[in-house]
Amino acid sequence: MQPAEWHLLSDDAQLSMAQQALRHAAGLVARRAEWLAAEMEAGTLADRGGPDALRLLAALLQGDDPDRHGGPIGHA
């Protein structure tokens, strides 16, 4: 999709696509955090207390509660 085409979409379509992109990005970051934590536990990366912090980050990113972030979507 070209940037100019984005403005041709309805507000609901733009919102839906943005939500999907954010969920996808959060999933990618969460998987990387889990991978890094496992690498630290395996000794491949230096462990300075990171695995627990990374797993906390992953859990937060994987949360499925849309209301947790401040109410209805689409309203400032």
Image: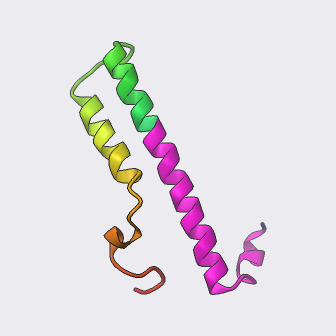
Please report the bounds of the magenta region as a residue range: 2-31
Q: Residue 3 occupies which quadrant of the picture?
A: bottom right
Q: Is residue 47 above or below residue 64?
A: above
Majority secondary structure of the magenta segment? helix
Task: Kindly give the residue lying farthest to the front in the view shown.
Answer: 64
Using residue 14 as the reference point, say whether residue 39 is left or right of it: left
Q: In this view, does 57 lie above or below 16?
A: above
Q: Dividing the image into 4 quarters, which one contains the C terminus?
A: bottom left
Q: Dividing the image into 4 quarters, which one contains the N terminus?
A: bottom right
| Image coords of residue 59 (percent x, y) | 34, 46
| Image coords of residue 52 (percent x, y) | 25, 34
Q: How is the image coloured?
A: rainbow
| Image coords of residue 58 (percent x, y) | 37, 44
The residue that appears at 26% across and 38% down in the rendered structure is: 53
The residue that appears at 77% across and 76% down in the rendered structure is: 5
Q: In this view, does 17 lie above or below 27?
A: below
Q: Is residue 60 magenta?
A: no
The residue that appears at 36% across and 14% down in the rendered structure is: 42
Q: Does the magenta stretch include residue 14?
A: yes
Q: In this view, does 8 lie above or below 46?
A: below
